[in-house]
Each structure stands twice: as structure tokens, then as C-alpha cells.
Image: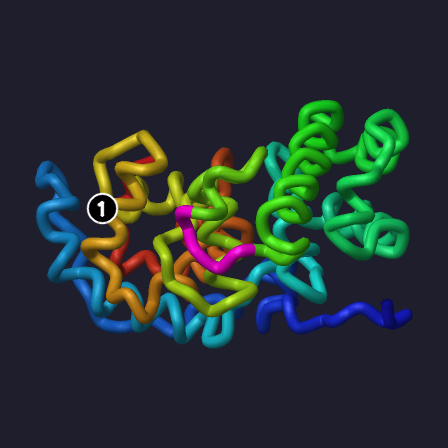
């Protein structure tokens, strides 16, 4: 593996660590009137919302550092209940030690747990990653499959992880990634009334053009980190305020 890891997964907004300039990139729009269900007006609001979103984040990418689909798959499994920054710190050395699916498949459970301990839930994650790697070796020649159906049956892989891998590693728009940021912002922006991840994804897939599914997921996640946090959203500085019904 090269000494220098690829930086291609960083975003124009430094993976969300730096908030975009305030007061810019606003597109004329009118948020739903108070007392109305904003989800009913979502189809009419989405085009302007997307225009603003992608003017703020014109080239959004996954913040997980990786050089190949296998590394992205492992990183995404590790990212459950853990920050991307922490995952990147762990994988900086992890991917030097384990380079192929066969390497992960042969890993000692206890040793691997120690390698990933700081990501949290390390026992379950270690078990899933090792089992997933074994399945990749036995059923896919050590390669990460390129279909949703093949990915979601792998240990530790659900729709969210599969969508991340297919969209980021292969450019395949299989769906919309729904993590905690996407869940929160989709509700606040009035794009869904659902709380279940798969139902939220279904609503978003109807509203967002398929050729924007991948970029939308990354951009919304970045905005969740930069502006629309769970506890203290920066509504005053939010570039999407004109499109937001402010359902906090």
C-alpha cells in the first residue's frame, strides 16, 4: 500500500469540519406556511432546495478515507455509532495491517477487537468484519460485489452500508444513504414524516432525481455537520433557511 493515502474522499468543505460561508448560495424560495404539512409541498420545493444545497457543496464526497471498495466497506461498518474522524484514525493503521479480504478473514478475533476498540461496539464490529471478509473470499473471490442484493446478505451490511459502498466506490445509485444526519435533516426540511430509515429512503427516492441520489446523501450529511446539528442547529446562519419549515 502506498505510504500516502488517497485524499479523494475529502470534500470541498473539508468533510464538513469547516462550515460554509454565511449568507451565500441562497436561492429564492418560500418555506411552507406554518400549520401546513410541509411534506405535501416537498415536490414543489425540492428543485430549489437541491439548487441551494449543491451550490453550497458542489462536489460532496464520503468523509471516510479509503483506497478501494474493501476499505470503504470495512470503514462503513466501523462507522456505526462512531464519528468518521475516529474511524479514519483507526483505519490509518488498520489498513496497513490488513490489506485484502483474505487478511481480514484470517484475523484473530481478540487481536482485531483491540485494533478497532476505540470505534465502540468493537466485539460485534470485529465479528461482522471478519465474517464479512470470509464471505467475500468464499463467495466473491475476495472482491466486493456490485449489487445491493449481494451486499445486504453479507454479515454487518445493511441498506445504508450497501448504498454507501455502491454509490461511493462504484458510482451506482442503488438508493439514498440514510444515516442519523439524513434522518434528522429530511424531517426538519419537511421531506418526510417517517422515522424508519427504509421508509425515509423510499420518500427521498421519490423526491430526489436518481442522478442526484449519491451526491444528495453526501451533501445533506455535510450540512448536518456544518449547520444543522441535533442539539444546536445554526438556523440563523443556515443557507437552506429559505427552504426550511424549521420543524425542530
What stretch of residues is rendered in magenta?
A: 145-149
Q: Main secondary structure of the magenta part?
A: loop
Residue 195 position, x and y percent, is: 31, 30
Left or right: where 140 falls relative to 207: right
Which image quadrant for residue 147? Answer: bottom left
Is residue 228 positioned above or below 125 on the image? below
At label 1, counting other C-alpha atoms closer than 10 Å, the crowd grade (few under 14, some 14-19, many 20 or more) is some
Residue at x 59%, y 56% (from the top left corner): 144
Residue at x 29%, y 40% (from the top left corner): 200
Q: Nearer the viewer, residue 63 or 239?
A: 63
Residue at x 80%, y 36% (from the top left corner): 116
Residue 80 appears in the rendering: yes
Q: Secondary structure at mark 1?
A: helix
Residue 207 position, x and y percent, is: 20, 57
Q: Nearer the viewer, residue 99 or 37?
A: 99
Q: Nearer the viewer, residue 87 or 3?
A: 3
Residue 180 appears in the rendering: no
Amino acid at each position: 500500500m502506498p505510504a500516502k493515502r488517497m485524499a479523494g474522499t475529502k470534500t470541498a468543505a473539508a468533510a464538513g469540519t469547516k462550515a460554509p460561508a454565511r449568507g451565500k448560495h441562497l436561492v429564492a424560495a418560500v418555506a411552507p406556511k406554518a400549520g401546513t404539512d410541509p411534506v405535501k409541498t416537498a415536490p414543489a420545493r425540492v428543485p430549489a432546495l437541491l439548487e441551494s444545497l449543491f451550490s453550497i457543496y458542489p462536489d460532496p464526497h464520503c468523509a471516510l478515507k479509503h483506497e478501494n471498495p474493501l476499505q470503504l466497506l470495512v470503514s462503513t461498518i466501523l462507522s456505526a455509532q462512531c464519528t468518521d474522524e475516529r474511524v479514519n484514525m483507526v483505519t490509518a493503521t488498520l489498513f496497513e495491517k490488513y490489506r485484502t479480504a483474505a487478511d481480514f478473514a484470517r484475523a484473530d478475533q481478540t487481536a482485531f477487537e483491540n485494533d478497532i476498540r476505540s470505534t465502540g461496539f468493537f466485539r460485534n464490529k470485529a465479528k461482522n468484519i471478519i465474517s464479512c471478509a470470509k464471505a467475500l473470499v468464499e463467495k466473491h473471490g475476495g472482491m466486493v460485489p456490485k449489487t445491493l442484493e449481494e451486499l445486504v446478505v453479507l454479515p454487518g451490511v445493511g441498506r445504508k452500508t450497501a448504498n454507501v459502498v455502491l454509490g461511493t466506490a462504484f458510482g451506482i445509485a442503488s438508493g439514498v444513504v440514510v444515516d442519523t444526519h439524513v434522518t434528522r435533516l429530511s424531517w426538519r426540511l419537511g421531506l418526510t414524516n417517517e422515522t424508519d430509515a427504509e421508509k425515509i429512503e423510499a420518500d427521498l427516492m421519490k423526491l430526489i432525481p436518481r442522478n442526484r441520489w449519491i451526491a444528495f446523501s453526501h451533501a445533506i450529511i455535510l450540512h448536518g455537520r456544518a449547520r444543522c446539528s441535533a442539539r444546536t442547529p445554526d438556523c440563523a446562519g443556515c443557507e437552506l433557511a429559505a427552504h426550511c419549515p424549521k420543524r425542530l
